[in-house]
Structures are given as C-alpha cells and as structure tokens.
Image (cartoon, rainbow, N blue to C red):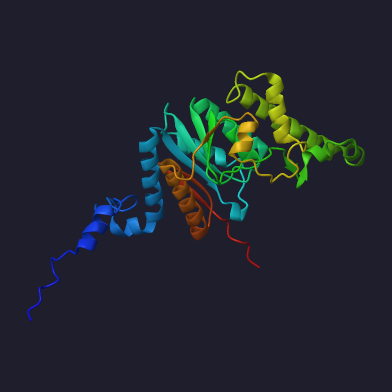
Amino acid sequence: MATTPLKGRISLRTRKVQRNAKPDRFPRTRRLPTQSPLYWVEQKDRYLRQLLIRDLEAMTKRRFVVYYANRAESAQIDAKDVAYITELFSDVGADSVDLLLETIGGVTDATEAIVSFLKNSTTDLRVIVADSAKSNGTLLALAANSIVMGATSELGPIEPLVGGIPCTILEQPQIASANFPLHMYGKYALQQTRALAKTLLTNGMMEGERLVRIDATVDALSSRNTYFSHGSVINHVEAVSLGLKIDYLPPDSELWQKIWLLYCMAEYDCRKSRYLKLFEGRARSTAVSIPPKPGP
C-alpha cells in the first residue's frame, strides 16, 4: 500500500499547539547580532542583559540602570562606587530613572556621596529592589521618590555597625566608661545615619508628613526598638506601615517578571564570571572583578 510522505503534513494536534503557543519573547530573535560572532559570543551575557534593560525602558518609558553588589562575596558600598555610578548616569540626562539596587550595605560616607550625586542628577528616581537592599542599601533607597518592591523584596534596618557591633550598643554609657573613643565613634556614626535618613524622608517620599511621624520612621529603622536584628526583613507591607512610598508589583506582573529575570541574570553572571559588582545601563557596563587571593 502506498503511503503519503510525512514531509509537508501537519497534524491537527500540531496545528492546535501552534495556535496556542505563546509568541517568542526575549531573548529569541531571527536577527543576527550586529557585533562580530566571536566578540558577541565573548560578551553575550552582557548583551543579553542590556537587551532586557532596553525592553524594560520600553515598558516604563523611563531609563533603567543597575547597581548589583555580589552578596555571595560580601560586596559592600564603598568610595569607589561613586565614580562608577557617575559614569553610569552620564548619558541619562534629565530623564526619569529606575535604579535596580542589590546590596547588603556598606560605608555610610560612600552612601552619602552616592545620595548626593543622585539628588543632583535626577529629580525623578525610583529604586527597584528585586531581592534585597539592606542596611545602607535601604538608606540609599530612601533617596528615591518611591521604592518598587515585589514578594521577594527586602529592606532592612539602617543602624550602622562598627566592627560588627551595633551603634545603639556603642552609644551606651557602659561603653563610654570602658572605651570612650569607640563610644564616640559609634555615637557619631548613628547620628550621621539618622540625620541623613530624616533629611531624605522630609524632602522626599514622606514630604508633607508631620515631623513626629518622620522621626518615628527614622527611629524604627535606626534603633533596636522595632527590629531586633540588623538583618531583619522589612517587606513591602512593613515598609508601607513605616510610611515609606512603595509601588508593589505582584509576581504575575509582566514588569515584575522582567525585573526578576534581569536580577537572576545579574546574580548568575556575577557568580559565574566572579564579579564583585556590576554597574550597567542600556549602553554602558562596568564589572568589578573579585580580587585574586594573595599567593603563599
């Protein structure tokens, strides 16, 4: 019996699958890269992240930049970050900006310098926290007009630590009698953090609120009266209760899914390529490598 060749035949089931299939999305395309093949292969992780950044900008009509500090390597905000962030923002101009922020915290002086730069560079800043912006990361986020959070997002207390010791402990009279210089160091560090937080909230996302309400928010974030651990989790619900302006995106939001994908790409690529930090926008990208371990 003659059989009909399979070539060119499409079953009813296949047609149904094709009709119900979702259209191709990032990062698939039929177009070839504009870069040379060898160069694209070498840099493809960066190119794919930047393609997604451009997709996010098309959705939000805002510029989108990334500051990712590798928490697996305990990367912290430091004085060198100011130059990288300045370079990252140098082609933003007067546009509204979304800053995807991932950090466990760091040096308060460096955080204050970054905040000063951001305040002088843009009047419409949103900070996006996909996973966590803790300690001075939360303090930096207070410089924004609002904070975008999802179900996985974490802020945290902003109380500084000195040598791993909370400054609320160092300011106690017992420490003053035992080690006065350390006591004063902790006291001034705490005053610096509280003053900066109050200024940012008063002139930013809590503008117009009564000062007593702002003071209560600063106290909750910078003391052990509300949060008993420096690593305490402040999710989007808790952040709203503190008076912070939060834009919550549910897990099924297309915007949130793209943000989460970009976060996952940055997290994986930093671990794979041994990056300490990543500063990235649609056209500019700088990665700071993990320093090699000293030899024997």
For the C terminus, the image quarter is bottom right
Q: Residue at x 60, y 37 (%)?
A: 237
Vertical relation: 107 (above or below) 9: above
The image position of residue 23, as x and y in percent, is 29, 50
For the N terminus, the image quarter is bottom left
The image position of residue 215, as x and y in percent, is 71, 25
Which residue sits furthest left? 2
Which residue sits furthest right? 177
Vertical relation: 263 (above or below) 5: above
Q: Is residue 235 left or right of residue 127?
A: right
Which residue sits furthest bottom? 1
The image position of residue 177, as x and y in percent, is 92, 38
Does residue 32 appear in the picture of this structure?
Answer: no
Instruction: Classify residue 238 by image quadrant.
Output: top right
The number of numbered discs placed on residues in the rendered structure image is: 0
Q: Is residue 159 left or right of residue 39?
A: right
Is 120 or 51 nearer to us in this picture? 51
Q: Residue at x 70, y 32 (%)?
A: 193
Q: Residue at x 68, y 37 (%)?
A: 158
Is 274 or 5 nearer to us in this picture? 5
Q: Residue at x 49, y 37 (%)?
A: 99
Vertical relation: 294 (above or below) 78: below
Does residue 53 appear in the picture of this structure?
Answer: yes
